[in-house]
C-alpha cells in the first residue's frame, strides 16, 4: 500500500503563538511538557469536531498483537484517515526518510541529539491502526503527517515542506471520497471506545516501547514478530521483515 507522508514546519503558527507562549511559560519545560505544548498547537489548528464531516481524536493509545502505539492526533474524514505525529523540537533537524535515526542540532552545532525517525514511527502507528480497524481500513486510506512546529528541517528527500497553511490545505485538497458518512461514524465510534476504555496504562505503554527496542536489537520485527533478514536495496543493505510484503518494517544496518 502506497503511503503519503507529509512533513510540515509550522512557521506561521510559531511566529504568532511562540511569543505569547514564551512570555506566559518562560520556565524550563520537561520533554513531556514540551511535547504536550506542541500537540496543543496542532489541536488549535485542527479545530472542533464537525459531526458527519470530520472527527478529531487526540492522544489515542491502541494495542495490536500485544504491542501499543500512542498516536498524537487522528482526523477521520470522507477522504481518508489523517495520522498526525507532533515533534516539538527546536534547532535544525537532519536526516533521510530511509534512515532510522535523525539528528537535532542546537547551539550552532555544539549540541547534537539523535532520535528515532518519526516517519518510521508513523508507519508503525499506521500498521497497528490498520489491524485495529479491520474491515474499516481501506487501501490508501491513511495520510501520514509529521509536524515540527519550531524546527528547521534539513531532511532528504522530503515529500512536501510548508507552513501552517499547508496543514489546513491538506484537508481541502481535492481527493476521491473513500468513506461514507456511516463509515466515518463507525470508525470514530470504534476508536473513541478504545480511548474511553484504554487497554494499557501509560506505564505499560512505556514498557512496550522498551520491549520494542529490544526486539529490534535482536532482529525481531516489532510489528509482526517475524525475523528481520539482511537484504539489499536501492540505498544499500538493510534488515527487512521476513513477512514482506505483508509487513514492510525495515531496520538500518
Image (tube, rainbow, N blue to C red):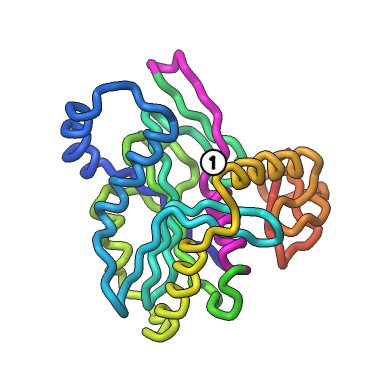
Quadrant in the picture for the C terminus: top right
Residue 241 drawn at (x, y percent)? 76, 55
Label 1 element class: strand
According to the picture, the residue beneath numbered tag 1 turns out to be 96
- Residue 104 is covered by the magenta coloring: no
Q: Is residue 237 visible to us here? A: no
Where is 25 relative to 74, above or below? above
Quadrant in the picture for the N terminus: bottom right
Where is 165 relative to 194, above or below? above
Rate crowding at label 1 as few (under 14), some (14 to 19) or many (20 or more) other CA atoms within 10 Å.
some
User: For residue 207, what is the image quadrant?
Assistant: top right
Please state which of residues 68 and 174 is positioned toward the viewer in this rendering. Answer: 68
User: For residue 217, what is the image quadrant?
Assistant: top right
Residue at 40% in and 79% down: 185
Residue 74 drawn at (x, y percent)? 42, 61
**Dominant secondary structure (helix, strand or loop) of the stretch shown in magenta:** helix
Residues rendered magenta in the picture = 107-131
Residue at 29% in and 22% down: 27
Residue at 19% in and 39% down: 17
- Residue 117 is covered by the magenta coloring: yes
User: For residue 139, what is the image quadrant?
Assistant: bottom right
Amino acid at each position: 500500500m502506497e503511503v503519503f507522508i507529509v512533513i510540515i514546519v509550522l512557521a506561521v503558527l510559531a511566529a504568532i503563538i511562540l511569543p505569547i507562549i514564551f512570555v506566559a511559560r518562560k520556565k524550563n519545560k520537561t520533554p513531556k511538557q514540551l511535547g504536550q505544548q506542541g500537540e496543543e498547537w496542532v489541536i488549535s489548528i485542527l479545530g472542533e469536531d464537525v459531526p458527519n464531516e470530520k472527527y478529531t481524536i487526540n492522544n489515542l493509545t491502541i494495542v495490536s498483537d500485544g504491542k501499543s502505539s500512542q498516536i498524537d492526533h487522528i482526523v477521520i474524514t470522507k477522504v481518508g484517515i489523517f495520522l498526525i505525529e507532533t515533534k516539538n523540537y527546536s534547532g535544525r533537524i537532519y536526516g533521510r526518510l530511509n534512515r532510522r535515526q535523525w539528528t537535532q542540532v542546537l547551539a550552532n552545532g555544539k549540541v547534537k541529539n539523535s532520535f528515532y525517525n518519526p516517519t518510521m514511527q508513523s508507519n508503525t502507528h499506521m500498521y497497528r491502526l490498520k489491524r485495529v480497524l479491520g474491515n474499516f481500513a481501506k487501501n490508501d486510506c491513511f495520510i501520514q503527517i509529521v509536524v515540527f512546529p519550531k524546527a528547521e528541517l534539513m531532511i532528504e528527500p522530503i515529500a512536501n515542506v510548508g507552513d501552517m497553511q499547508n496543514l489546513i490545505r491538506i484537508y481541502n485538497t481535492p481527493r476521491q471520497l473513500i468513506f461514507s458518512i456511516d463509515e466515518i461514524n463507525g470508525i470514530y465510534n470504534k476508536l473513541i471506545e478504545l480511548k474511553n476504555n484504554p487497554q494499557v496504562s501509560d506505564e505499560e505503554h512505556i514498557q512496550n516501547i522498551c520491549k520494542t527496542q529490544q526486539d529490534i536489537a535482536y532482529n525481531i520485527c516489532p510489528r509482526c514478530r517475524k525475523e528481520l533478514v539482511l537484504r539489499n536495496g536501492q540505498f544499500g543493505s538493510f534488515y527487512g521483515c521476513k513477512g514482506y510484503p505483508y509487513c514492510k518494517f525495515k531496520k538500518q544496518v
